[in-house]
Image: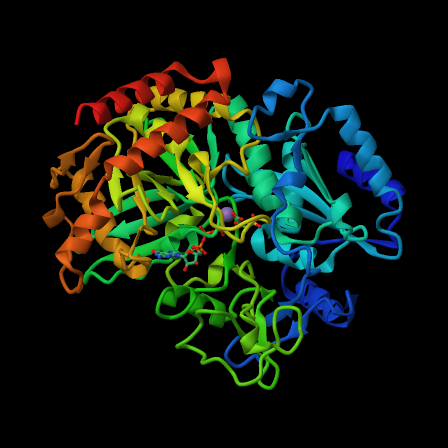
Amino acid sequence: MKELENWVEEQAKILKPKEIVWISEGEGKELENLVTQALKENFIGGKVLYELNQTPFPHSFLHRSHPEDVARTEHRTFLSFKDKNLAGPTNNFMGIQEAKELIYNLSKNAMEGRKMYVIPFIMGNPDSHYSLPCVQITDSIYVAISMCIMTRAGKVALEKIKERGKFIKGIHSLGNLDKDKKYIIHFPEEELVVSLNSGYGGNALLGKKCIALRIASYKGWCEGWLAEHMLIIEVENPEGKKFYFAAAAPSASGKTNLALLSPTLPGWKVRTLGDDIAWIHIGDDGKLYALNPEAGFFGVAPGTSSKTNPNMIKTLKSGKHLVTIFTNVALDPENLIPWWEGLEPDIPKPKKLLDWQGKYWDSSSGLPAAHPNSRFTVSIRNCPILSPEYDNPKGVPLDGIIFGSRRSSTIPLVFEAKDWQTGIFFAATMGAETTAAAEGKVGIVRRDPFSMLPFCGYNMAYYFKHWLKIGKIAKNKPKIFFVNWFRKKDGYFVWPGFGENIRVIKWMIDRIEGKAKGVEKEIGIIPKEEEIDLSGLEMKREDVEFALSLKRDEWEKEISDIEVFLKSFGDELPDEIRKTLHSIKKKFKNI
Ligand code: GTP
Ligand code: SPV
Ligand code: MN
């Protein structure tokens, strides 16, 4: 395709790579050759990839990133529009001319001495009307291999680019990994992303947050659909009836775990469709249909074990499809087995351990051996509970949308919004404690609307309006629920979480089927204690009560924080949200 060839040529003139390599298969021999190359190629004092013990972890490799390039960098992530107002108060804005000049200056000769990989890829099932063909260029072989795992790459995408005559563009260069020159700049109107001087996941695998969320959410706003930071699951009850849920949660706050949930209640089954991103369209029947545009998991390693997430451990040990990469985990140097905090009891902590930077780990240092944001990159096809509906080009019809917070107080284990408008209000004002998925202090409560604060590709006030509008058009809407697995009592998580979360989903299904009444409280419908199935679980009554409780002092503070946050949107804030705030405030005053 001429436009593609011209664009690649044009970029090569600026970036000056020593060679251009087109990815045509993204699997098989081609992927094998890339891995062989990466095992030999130098990268910050070592190699790009190290082979791991193939017995427990077939087709698995270790990568160590630059030690200062280990998480998304929100303060260096920008949206560039003609009109500043389109970025809104929660995003960093950069004018188009300034951005283009900066990029040109930083890109000149940035790929000198390196190969430039051209990766055609498609987000979503190629047969889907909703999938989007894209092309990323990169000078990182680690990024090229990761893109082959995370997306449908190669000729399948190239064919669609030719057929549709257009593609979303991504330019990525490691440059010199200078953190002061790191920029991730999005041009939603032009459907272009440029990322320079970082090699880390969300900053560098451009299909993921940059394209499938920031560019796609803007596109969805223009075209009438949604791009969301959500997992997708199929839940089958003991009678064989299936229900579909999409669930948002902030980064490193339980999506992957919920997506691969292994239910503790007998007879219940959960199957995975996606663990991080959902594109949601309105169907002809007025239902909302969700599909996963990705083809792999880029999941948090620490805390993953056969106790918390047995299906992920099986996924990582499968080795059936493509290759698996562990980034910034620790390593048992004798047995070449990856290790991270929370992996016991599967793999006991080895006597000798290399930390995530490859140095001998001193257990008395108080520092973790694996980086808290260490991750694995693995094909979704290796997941033993992948739903056959993953390949459905239309997506699956949603029965429920779940919004999860990470809050040690205030937010109860679960509640249902009384209606769509109230659901949008709580989603828009959700708070969450920050995690290691982004640079900065961990554990600070900040408002993270829809878990999209770092990923919304346009003015968040318009995004709220867009969700409200979707609710008006879709006549067969899912119910909206809120969950918080992270509430603490005396310093401990009061809810056991993980596989036990099926008990909360069961209540949601009872609500969907009209079997559970719940109790109406100020914020919505909360389960009656006896409506949560606790069979086979040893949990004190008072702890369940605590998990479901609303504390007046906590909610007074919550509402005043919400008010401050909503003020930042000024006049752009939708009236519906302002009105819902008043009505909820009034309810709390009336207690
Ligand atoms: P991103 O990939 O960053 O978008 O995150 P994610 O939402 O997929 O995060 P993930 O599921 O990997 O969550 C990681 C963290 O959440 C780990 O620290 C887990 O131990 C913790 N976690 C997940 N589910 C639960 C749960 O039900 N209860 C508790 N207490 N912790 C959980
Ligand atoms: C997140 O931070 O929400 C992730 C990882 O899913 S990254 O791809 O780095 O954004
Ligand atoms: Mn994520």
* Front residue of this view, candidates 157 and 209: 209
Decide: is 46 above or below 285: below
Residue 239 seen: no
Find residue 101 and report its horizontal and vertical position in percent. 83, 31
Rendered location of residue 113, percent (x, y): 88, 57
Residue at position x 20%, y 60% in the image? 265
Image spot of residue 553 (x, y percent): 27, 36
Residue 263 can be seen, yes or no: yes
Q: Is residue 295 above or below residue 577?
A: below
Which of the pair 220/454 is nearer the observer?
454
What quarter of the picture does the C terminus occupy?
A: top left
Q: Going by the image, does 334 lie left or right of 248?
A: right
Displayed quadrant of residue 523: top left
Q: Quadrant of the N terminus?
A: top right
Q: Is residue 587 left or right of residue 434?
A: left
**Residue beneath the point at 86% across and 51% down:** 17
